[in-house]
C-alpha cells in the first residue's frame, strides 16, 4: 500500500476592515450556507474608531460575497481604490494583509474634512430653504442667518459656525 501526501493550498483568507470614522462601527454579516448564500448565522464584529480588525476568516469566494453585500450600502472601499473614491470613506478593507496604521490615520483625518465640507453645504442649503419658505409666506425679510455650535460630550463648546443668505428684493 502506498501512502499519498496531498498538498493543499491555503483555503482560508482574512478580511481586514479598518474603521476610518470617529465612532465605533458594528460590522454585520451572515455566514454562508452550503450553497454559498449569506443566509447563515449572523456574525457581528465591533471595530473601534481609527482601528482595524480581522472580521472574517473564510474562503476568498465567501469574503467577496461579504464585501459585495456590504458595498451596496456604501461606505466600504477596497484599500487599492480609496484614492479614486471622492468624499467620505468610512470603512476600508483588504484581504490577507493589514492596513497600515498611518494610512488609517490619514484617511481618518480626510474623512473629518470631507464631513465638515458636506455639513457646510447642508447648512447653507437648509438656510436657503428656510429663507425661501419665509419669503413664500410673505414675511418681509432681506437676509437670514443661522448658527450652529457643536458641544462635545464634556459640555465644551466648539467654534460657532454661521451661515448667511441674502434674499433678492
Image (tube, rainbow, N blue to C red):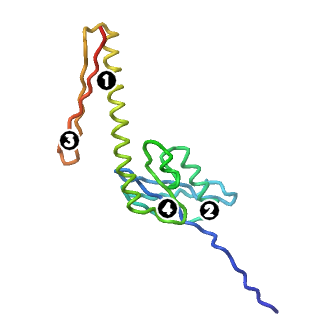
The residue that disc 3 covers is 158
User: Which residue is drawn at the image coordinates 36% and 31% (left, top)?
Assistant: 121
Where's residue 92, x and y in %? 47, 54
> Which numbered disc flags the more N-terminal residue, 3 or 4?
4
Q: Secondary structure at mark 4?
A: strand
> Which numbered disc flags the more N-terminal residue, 1 or 4?
4
Where's residue 59, x and y in %? 62, 64
Question: In which quadrant of the rendered image does the C terminus lie?
Answer: top left
Q: Secondary structure at mark 3?
A: strand
> Which numbered disc flags the more N-terminal residue, 4 or 2?
4
Where's residue 16, x and y in %? 49, 61
Left-right relation of 66 to 50: right
The residue that disc 4 covers is 16
> Which numbered disc flags the more N-terminal residue, 1 or 3?
1
> How many neighbours does mark 3 have within 10 angstroms: few (below 14), some (14-19), or many (20 or more)?
few
User: Which residue is drawn at the image coordinates 76% and 86% (left, top)?
Assistant: 4
In 3D space, how far apart are the residues under numbered discs 1 and 2 (Cα atoms)? 48 Å
Question: In which quadrant of the rendered image does the N terminus lie?
Answer: bottom right
Could you say which quadrant of the image residue 161 lies in? top left
The residue that disc 1 covers is 127
> How many neighbours does mark 1 have within 10 angstroms: few (below 14), some (14-19), or many (20 or more)?
some
Between 36 and 102, the one lying in front of the other is 102
Amino acid at each position: 500500500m502506498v501512502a499519498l501526501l496531498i498538498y493543499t493550498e491555503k483555503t482560508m483568507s482574512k478580511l481586514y476592515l479598518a474603521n476610518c470614522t470617529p465612532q465605533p462601527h458594528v460590522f454585520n454579516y451572515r455566514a454562508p450556507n452550503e450553497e454559498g448564500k449569506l443566509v447563515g448565522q449572523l456574525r457581528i464584529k465591533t471595530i473601534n474608531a481609527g482601528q482595524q480588525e480581522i472580521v472574517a476568516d473564510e474562503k476568498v469566494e465567501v469574503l467577496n460575497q461579504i464585501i459585495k453585500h456590504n458595498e451596496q450600502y456604501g461606505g466600504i472601499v477596497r484599500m487599492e481604490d480609496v484614492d479614486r473614491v471622492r468624499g467620505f470613506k468610512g470603512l476600508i478593507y483588504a484581504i490577507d494583509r493589514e492596513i497600515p496604521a498611518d494610512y488609517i490615520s490619514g484617511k481618518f483625518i480626510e474623512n473629518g474634512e470631507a464631513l465638515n465640507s458636506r455639513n457646510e453645504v447642508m447648512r447653507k442649503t437648509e438656510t436657503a430653504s428656510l429663507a425661501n419658505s419665509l419669503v413664500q409666506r410673505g414675511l418681509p425679510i432681506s437676509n437670514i442667518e443661522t448658527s450652529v455650535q457643536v458641544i462635545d460630550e464634556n459640555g465644551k463648546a466648539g467654534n460657532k459656525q454661521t451661515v448667511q443668505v441674502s434674499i433678492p428684493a
